[in-house]
Amino acid sequence: MSRTLKFRKINYALMLSAVFMFLGCSRIPGRPGPGPEVVRPEEVLAFPALYQQNCAACHGENGRNGAAISLANPVYIALAGDSNLHEVIAKGVSGKLMPAFSKSAGGTLTDQQITVLAQGIQKEWGNPSLLAGQNPLPYLATLQGNAEHGLAAYGVFCARCHGAIGEGGPADGNANSTKSKLGSIVDPSYLAIISDQNLRSITIAGRPDEAMPDWRTDAARPMTDQEVTDILAWLASKRVTDPGQPYPAHP
């Protein structure tokens, strides 16, 4: 081997050594970086990511037009408040479709992630001053309901859109409307999967994504707490033991 070629190889080796020293060992191609390549689930603290992963499937990608209650509803957020939102996310609703997300209740999210979701929903879709100076109905029921009185109140505030006995009707209350018909709200299968609190929340806060007004309604006057409670008592009376079964079970 010629002296010139030998010196070239030595120089090449020295150059490579200098490059690796300059870049550092952590930059060697093929070597893992100092941190994890994938963020651990409990380390996800961004509201958009947490919402998309845990909430969007039921409540809608943008908080609306989902199967569950609309979260992009500032009236609902103002009525529920931080503590109720936090508790429902953490503990879910027993026996219904809302699962518990907190690890302490069998879910997959940390307490910090629950807080991020509750506060993120309020920041994204809430309006703290929306009901200022008004007298909103309480989020939780405190009165005793009367189903018979509830049917009468239902006829005043709800029948125009939902039908005379809850069987469904035109979305805008116009019998000649070309809009899609609302489904039955007394269907036993529907009542089996929705909680009393969910029914109350929807009745008070409305569903703006479906043009349903809140308790202030489009009637001559707002609904009272007693009327809401009575209507929900009437709806609850329509629940059956075995929903979805057209024939009684035989022993």
Image: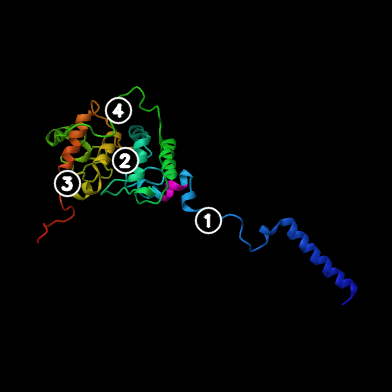
The number of numbered badges drawn on the structure is 4
Q: Which mark is residue 136?
A: 4
User: In the orientation shown, which residue stands out farthest toward the right?
Assistant: 3
Write down the quadrant of residue 11 in the picture: bottom right
Disc 1 marks which amino acid? Val
Percent from the top left, x then y, of residue 171?
26, 40
Q: Earlier in the sequence, mark 1 or mark 2?
A: 1
- Dot 4: element: loop
For disc 1, the marked residue is: 38
Percent from the top left, x then y, of residue 66?
34, 46
Q: Which residues are magenta?
A: 49-53
4 vs 2, front mark: 4
C-beta proximity under 8 Å, tags 1 and 4 = no
Q: Earlier in the sequence, mark 2 or mark 3?
A: 2
Give how far apart the Cα atoms at labels 3 and 4 are. Answer: 28 Å
Give how far apart the Cα atoms at labels 1 and 3 are. Answer: 47 Å
Report the front residue among 185 and 47. 47
Percent from the top left, x then y, of residue 235?
18, 41
1 vs 4, front mark: 1
Disc 2 marks which amino acid? Glu
- Dot 2: element: helix
Q: Callout 2: few (<14), some (14-19), or many (20+) C-alpha neighbours within 10 Å?
A: few
User: Does residue 231 show up?
Assistant: yes
1 vs 2, front mark: 1
For disc 3, the marked residue is: 239
Give how far apart the Cα atoms at labels 4 and 2 are. Answer: 21 Å
For disc 2, the marked residue is: 210
The residue depicted at 74 percent of the width and 58 percent of the height is: 21
Write down the quadrant of residue 81 in the picture: top left
